[in-house]
Image (cartoon, rainbow, N blue to C red):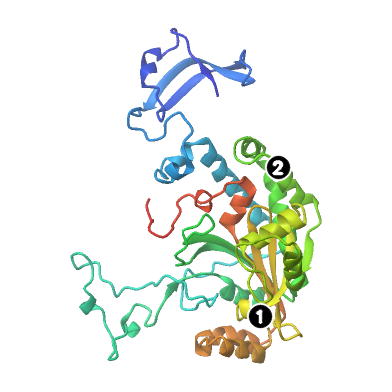
Amino acid sequence: MQCVLTPDTEGYDQIDSVTTGASVLVEGVVASSQGGKQKVELKVSKITVIGKSDPTSFPIQKKRASREFLRTVAHLRPRTNTFGAVTRVRNALAYATHKFFQDNGFVWVSSPIITASDCEGAGEQFYVTTLLSNSAEGGSLLKDIPATKDGRVDWSQDFFCKPAFLTVSGQLNGETYASALSDIYTFGPTFRAENSNTARHLAEFWMIEPELAFADLNDDMACATAYLQYVVKYIIENCKEDMDFFNTWVEKGIIDRLNDVVEKKFVHLSYTDAVELLLGSKKKFEFPVKWGLDLQSEHERYITEVAFGGRPVIIRDYPKEIKAFYMRQNDDGKTVAAMDLLVPRVGELIGGSQREERLDHLEARLDEQNLNKESYWWYLDLRRYGSVPHAGFGLGFERLVQFATGIDNIRDAIPFPRVPGSAEF
């Protein structure tokens, strides 16, 4: 808003205190503007400085600041145009997420943040412990941490009497409620202690994880498609000013790209066909392409951006060796009923599967991956008592924010990023 003052304006003597970062109360009349950059302006009758800001020390000056710099002042960056717009779109995506699932009869379930199981089987988890006392000056001494006779940490002395972690996923807990209430979803923070300093990884991020009872992989893919199209359409219709801002200043053409998601039919492709497509492209990739290897971001982006011209792509039926133990084995014995939804600029946005509902198959998969069946006793119980075919998916919320705003680095898609070496603010 352009505010026009004259020497007759009440409070005009405070004008020297109206500096970058200051907060003011402005009263006046909205009138049509003579300038070409805005349609209306405020003819000010009174101005009051509420909070002063020292222009020599306020970190964000009236010039374009790099996103890297703004991460060092994350407590002030929401005041910039870019981060104000990102935050509003993030809020709209969260609202649209709840609205989509609630309108379709899903029940929201609060999955625990502290857990004793590793859903992904990847072992990249943060420990939760009270064995490290804060009362000692400078923290605990190693000799004060209880140990067993063979020199290992004695977890029986800890708060939960066994190792506990910050969760990497709410999925396993979600399955318990889906087996009772049919369609549920979780939406909450998850954590991964992966030492990755990339523009795609966070140590703390939010996950949306629906779980559908009496459903197979086709139902899962249909739900993921409908969800993505719904939330994208919602922000196009309800965040017009912010989306115009991103289209001008962040990624030219972003509105057209998002409209493609809403309007174009998603491509369905088997993993085997995807590998053949990549091998036939004759393109030189950094990572090798071979049946049995996981697809990397560069492969996923080539498929959705180049091979299919910006259309979202769902790849299904992955080799069982590269997927988690809980995914349902296909009849070929080599692949599982898994799917990844790929979008331009991001690559994989959603990963899901039909879950293994057959007790003997699930126990065999746990044995194959050397996972302790006793740790998953309650998860196996779901297959012992009234098991049903069911499926679900996980979506990293910050990747969705990236996709919807055109922001390059995932650290700019969350208010306070947690990454290796940094837990500031």
Give the side of residue 369 with respect to residue 258, left or right. Answer: left
Give the CA distance from mark 1 to mark 2. 37 Å
Dot label at residue 255: 2
Picture residue at 68% right of the left edge, 65% below the top: 106
Q: In the figure, is residue 205 to the left or right of 250?
A: left
> In front: 293, or 149?
293
129 or 402, nearer to the observer:
402
Foreground: 283 or 292? Answer: 283
Residue for point 51% across, 59% down: 201
Q: Position of residue 326 (x, y in %)?
A: 62, 80
Q: Split into 4 quadrants, where in the image is the N terminus? A: top right
Which residue type carries mark 2?
Answer: Ile
Amino acid at circle 1: Lys
The reply to whether residue 35 is in sight is: yes
Instruction: Kindly state the secondary structure of the residue where label 2 is placed.
Output: helix
Q: Which mark is residue 187?
A: none
Residue where numbered disc 1 is placed: 320
The tag earlier along the polypeptide, 1 or 2, is: 2
Label 1: how many residues lie within 10 Å, few (<14), some (14-19) or many (20+)? many
